[in-house]
Image (tube, rainbow, N blue to C red):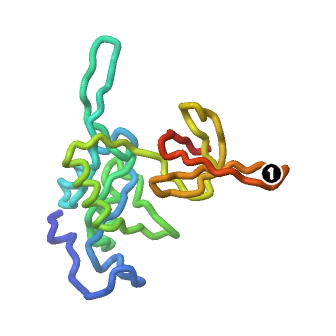
Amino acid sequence: MSPEQLSCPSSGTALGSPGSSTDVVCWYAVQMRGRFEKKVTAELEAKGIEAYLPAVKQVHRWSDRRQVVVVPLFPGYGFVHVCLTPKARLTVIQSAGVIGFVRFQGEPVPVPDKQVEDIKRILSQDLPCAMFPFLRVGQKVRIRGGCLDGIEGMLAERSSDKTLLIAITAIQRTIAIEISNYDIEIL
């Protein structure tokens, strides 16, 4: 299938309005079988669909050697840049290894172009980066490492200076600790 067959006419519909997801070319996240991301991306591109698999270099160590390998930044996920017509949707879904589009309320969710471009820009600079759990204000977390190892609390801020709240329910009081230099895990 050629890219021309997957393109859609410009209709002038505003992005974000009802029904507009099939009228404009957008990035969409696609869930893929684990360890099949590179094959799926290659197959989608062979079908004329622009696909992007963010990848990073990691050093893997075995007992007898070390080797630099390229692994997906988001294991099990990639991105496609398509106009979500029924034909394009079917082409993506029927690709070997594709589980489906990432959906919200049953509809594929467009990923803002800026976010995909930011990922591309960061990865092009060979900056060290790794996936980090998605944290929300109000989530229970535990500090890992350092003098506060094992302390649990609730995440209060998502800015660069993360704050952990520790509630003492018996006296209905809370203390706040700045944890910007600590590793944390979601409970």
Q: Is residue 8 left or right of residue 135?
A: left
Question: Which quadrant of the figure contains the C terminus?
Answer: top right
Q: Residue at x 35, y 65 (%)?
A: 111
Dot 1 amino acid type: Thr
User: Is the N terminus in the top left, top right, bottom left or bottom right quadrant?
Assistant: bottom left
Residue 84 lies, in percent from the top left, at 32, 71
What crowding class fits label 1: few (fewer than 14 Cα within 10 Å), some (14-19), or many (20 or more)? few
Residue 164: percent from the left, percent from the top? 60, 49
Is residue 87 positioned above or below 174 on the image?
A: below
Under circle 1, the secondary element is: helix
How many numbered marks are there?
1
Question: Which of the 4 image quadrants contains residue 87?
Answer: bottom left
Please, which residue is most extreme toward the top here? 64
> Disc 1 designates what residue?
169
| Rendering coords of residue 41 (x, y %) | 26, 50
Q: Is residue 123 left or right of residue 136?
A: left
Q: Residue furthest right?
A: 170
